[in-house]
Amino acid sequence: MGPTPDFKRPRGTQDILPDEAAKWRALELVMARHAESFGFGEIRTPIFEETELYTRTSGASSDIVRKEMYTFLDRGGRSMTLRPEGTAGVARAYLENGLASAPQPVKLWYLGPLFRYDRPQAGRLRQHTQFGVEVFGAASPLADLEVVLVAHDLLARLGLERVVFRLNSIGCPACRPAYRERLVAYFGAAGDRLCPDCRERVGHNPLRVFDCKSEDCRALLDGAPLSVESLCPECEAHHLRVGEGLAALGVPREDDPRLVRGLDYYTRTVFEAVYQPPEGAAGAQHVLCGGGRYDGLVEELGGPPTPGVGFGLGVDRLVATLEREGLAVPPAGEPEGPPVFVATTGGPSEVEGLALARRLRGAGFRVVTDLLGRSLKAQFRAADRAGARVVLVGEDELARRVAAVRDLDSGVQTEVPVDRVVEVLAEWRRR
């Protein structure tokens, strides 16, 4: 043992030493390559922003704003806050840098430190690292599905098999006010049975009561109104399509009608990826990542109405889970050749297109899918801008279990069985 140092690292932080740092670097490269295989581009935003960015978007009464932010005055007397979550800063950058005028959707990934003044515990540090993805400009449930697939397929790629995605819908501005009234009436009748924090939450955002860890509050949740009981037809249809799509793609999921998120900007879809340890193994189940829709966030920052969806994944907790499972980080690999654009014609072909895209990514291709429900002509233009080859899966092709593979450079189109698309494109890549 060496001499006792005069200083120690701040509580709730960690030093990552060389051997461990090598594992982190390998994992970070896998995450980067994985996001890029879905057509996401990297974004890096400042680790501090104007405090109002978070108070306006997260909710002034949220636990993050009230209890957890590291806020300070700079030398100009401006209030600044170390980044407590990733999405608001990315949305600010999307708007400030003119990405709202770029071809949509805009798909971004990020990796960096977050700071929350919370009670330190396993998997919850005051400085922790988060990997996240955001999709702006796509209102379709296909965007929700793709975001979930990014998380699911990353965890599967790392060898984590006992992961279940919990899914819920918390509605939109059209249907949430009526649901809020039902919650206020229900929790208002509970009176002093709510903890002091939740009594305050009821007046600002009663959905946050579902996030409370107090046993007394949790006992009241069994009879509380559920958001899925108050959805408008549009939200109900959106939620149904997301659930059906996940089932068709084989993503393990549980409907959790009490699942909410702790930030005010979420709408419609919310989800979490929950790791479930083997029976009898040490450690409890825990959340690896969480996310959902935030269709009003960009507008809240002064931009045009812009749908959005994404997730954040805690890298520290992921590293600990991989170590507990005895899993080594696999090689990252690097996609070869031009990207592939999977075009569809709507209906069942959309989910079939997502499934084909997953198989292509598994073979090392970068693959982009249409998330906007565009015409084939518009999809081909998007593929041309990306310098991609096109695989068309339409209603007619789906019925015959074939796909049309088109090279936009040469104009050559070949019709092949769906189960041979990966093989054919691999041959084209070797040419």
Image (cartoon, helix red, strand yellow):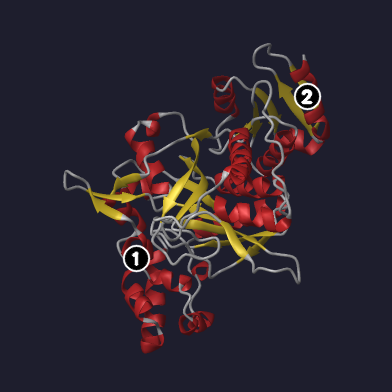
Residue 429 location (% of width, % of height)? 74, 19
Residue 241 location (% of width, % of height)? 61, 53
Q: Is residue 313 visible?
A: yes
**Nearer to the camera, 320 or 339:** 320
Q: Quadrant of the C terminus?
A: top right
* Residue drawn at (56%, 58%) of the image: 271
Q: Secondary structure beneath disc 1?
A: helix
Residue 261 location (% of width, % of height)? 47, 62
Pointer 1 residue: 67
In the image, residue 380 sits, relative to residue 149, either above or below, namely above
**Nearer to the camera, 398 or 144:** 144
Q: Earlier in the sequence, mark 2 or mark 1?
A: 1
* Residue drawn at (57%, 46%) of the image: 147
Apparent side of residue 375 relative to residue 263 in the rendered image (left or right): right
Local crowd size for mark 2, using a 10 Å CA cut-off: few (<14), some (14–19), many (≥20) = some
Q: Secondary structure beneath disc 2?
A: helix
- Give the CA separation, mark 2 to mark 1: 53 Å
- Inspect the image, locate mark 2, and give the three-letter code of the amino acid beneath it: Ala
The circle on residue 426 is 2
* Residue drawn at (37%, 40%) of the image: 46
